[in-house]
Image (tube, rainbow, N blue to C red):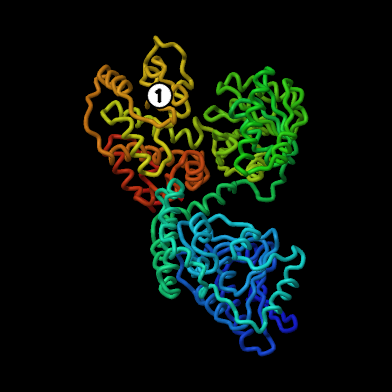
Amino acid sequence: MTSPIRTERRDNVLVVISDNPPVNALGQAVRAGLKDAIEKALSDEAVEAVVIRCDGRTFFAGADITEFGKPPVGPNLPETLDAMEASDKPVVAAIHGTALGGGCEVALACHYRVAVPSAKLGLPEVKLGLIPGAAGTQRLPRLVGAEAALPLVVGGNPISAKKAQGIGLVDEIVGEDSLEADAIAFAKSKIGQPVPRASEGTANEDGVRDPDLFDRFRASQARKIRGFDAPNAAIEAVKAAGTMSYAEGVKKERELFTELMSGTQSAAMRHYFFAERAANKIDDVPRDTPLIPIRKVGVIGAGTMGGGISMNFLSAGIPVTILEMNQDALDRGTGTMRKNYENTAKKGRMTADQVEQAMGLLTPTLSYDELADCDLVIEAVYESIDVKKEVFGKLDKVVKQGAILASNTSYLDMNEIAAATQRPGYVLGMHFFSPANIMKLLEVVRGEKTRDDVLATVMKLSKTIGKVAAVSGVCPGFIGNRMLSKRQEQANALIMEGANYWEVDEVLLDFGFPMGPFQMGDLAGIDIGWHRDPSKVATVREALCAVGRFGQKAGKGYYDYDEARQRTPSNEVKQIIADFAAKEGKEHREISKDEIRERLLYPMVNEGAKILEEGMAQRASDIDVVWINGYGWPLYTGGPMFWAQTIGLDTVVEGLGKHGLPVSNYLRERAADSGKFD
């Protein structure tokens, strides 16, 4: 087998080149080739310096994740990097593309680093529930200081070559088109000088002089890292770089890495890593299916959803024509879009020019005729099947043949909507989540007659606009809302049986959700869908609306809110619930947190099993993608279906039975068989 590593002599410099597409992952053959190349350089007196670079689109972009969980085959990465750093001949990393994870650790083990301006460097292991495992947490702080190292190791986001140079991670920025030549010249300039080794650096003393640095950083990141094990381990590892010798620090890093690798959080986050990539693949649609070019998009409705949907395309450089029924609504909607962009610019995430560029791609209109030449039209109007069918009937007459017609419905029957047109093959659902310009999930609803090229086009387009897409079949609520309804049913039942509504919310907060069902109701607005008749009260929710408790916007919903929107439980709401329970003959009792958690989450898993059995989702991991990206299910549990497998499907079946809740045949079969869904 041909080695992915080759060497080429340039005068007295040995250039070591990796060619391991697509991203030069640091698999066993690459590690062995690098170690052999360094040994070759050290044994050859004619070689006085080494440059390490990569063919293809990127420098080493990380470990070979497919090796995770498999028996190790040497040499391991730490051995390879130690041999590299031990060289007394200068070793220079020549970086283009991304140097991520193990790739960044390769660069750290080199004596010098040069990079092209477009390069990025980072240690994203935390996003897989891990920390760097090849001394990255020990070399980096010693090279750049603990204060500069913490965001890289704990946050996991890459930084630009310019920023890397600013903190001392990159020594020199070189030409985009002359990386190898410039790296060789740089290497030659260092021949004869003592080589600097990151493991011997002293920049980490900033964490010794200011030991409170780590607590301050942890406090500043408290909200982002709540519930995650890896970020706290990363802080501990970086701190060890200042309190321990290099050898002891490396040992500490390895202990922390091993503990995380064998834990459930990393398994869950690695599951999600693959799940997100799998979700974009449609099993029965050939990968070479020709796509429909999307050069112009139409959006019907300039409200919260329509405006947010439009912003996704404008930000991606795709022109949008947005339609409203009257000028005031149109002006209000486009004004909100501009304000949202300007707020983003104030936060430094856009420039003023980029705001104008995005808004310059927007064409507001009051006429359906202006949508005629669009390649894709997305309807975002009131959630009524009759209204939507009327809209699609109009679109079918106006919009050019071959264009895709999509509905942003969150619940309705896409097949019935498609039947309102003469082109059902070109109709599908694109369910964005609010706020649509921020939330990452896009549920793509495949109708019975949706064409392969239409589906493939929208899945590809989802990446272009920065969304994570998952395919759903046509059923009430699709994947996400169908499962959510089961959770809400139990939440409502629990408060009638004696659980306080704030306790129900707290159980989900403790589990890792950003909010509970009653907090979510207050945030969205309890009056959504209310019939507006205060004398007609059949549910707790209607009773709250009847007394003006519409949610956060009214200063009171399930909770009372102060001016800062801080919530406190309401005695009025507690009494309303008690009155309803008494009227229905429900006797209140003490309900444990365990029962609340099981009754909220187990029925969701059961409904997910039914969704799989009916073929409404391609795979269980797609359901996990939906819930992590659209509903705040904690990433470190891997999503509802993976979590259920972690605690045991038999545990879920038993719990449902204990609480007198239905159990699907499919869930029983999976529990009795492999204990897994996929």
Residue found 43% across the figure and 34% down from its top: 484
Instruction: Name the residue beneath numbered marker 1.
Output: 557
- Give the image quarter of residue 406: top right
Q: In this view, does 27 lie above or below 433?
A: below
- Give the image quarter of residue 357: top right
Estimate the x, y position of residue 552 in percent, counting from the top left.
Answer: 44, 26
Dot 1 lies on which element? loop
Q: Which residue lies furthest to the front in this view?
A: 209
Could you tell whether 520 is left or right of 350 in the image?
left
Q: Is residue 330 above or below residue 232?
A: above
Estimate the x, y position of residue 177 in percent, counting from the top left.
Answer: 77, 64
Q: Residues within 10 Å of mark 1 (few under 14, many from 20)?
A: many
Estimate the x, y position of residue 95 in percent, counting from the top left.
Answer: 66, 66
Could you tell whether 406 is left or right of 475 in the image?
right
Q: In this view, does 384 lie above or below 160?
A: above
Whether residue 76 is visible:
no
- Give the image quarter of residue 542: top left
Residue found 69% across the figure and 47% down from its top: 289
Of 653 and 513, the residue lying toward us: 513
Of 458 and 437, the residue lying toward us: 437
Estimate the x, y position of residue 491 in percent, counting from the top left.
Answer: 35, 31
Could you tell whether 584 is left or right of 678 in the image?
left
Q: Is residue 436 above or below residue 16?
A: above
Q: What residue type is labelled 1?
A: Gly
| Quadrant location, the N terminus | bottom right
Whether residue 335 is visible:
yes
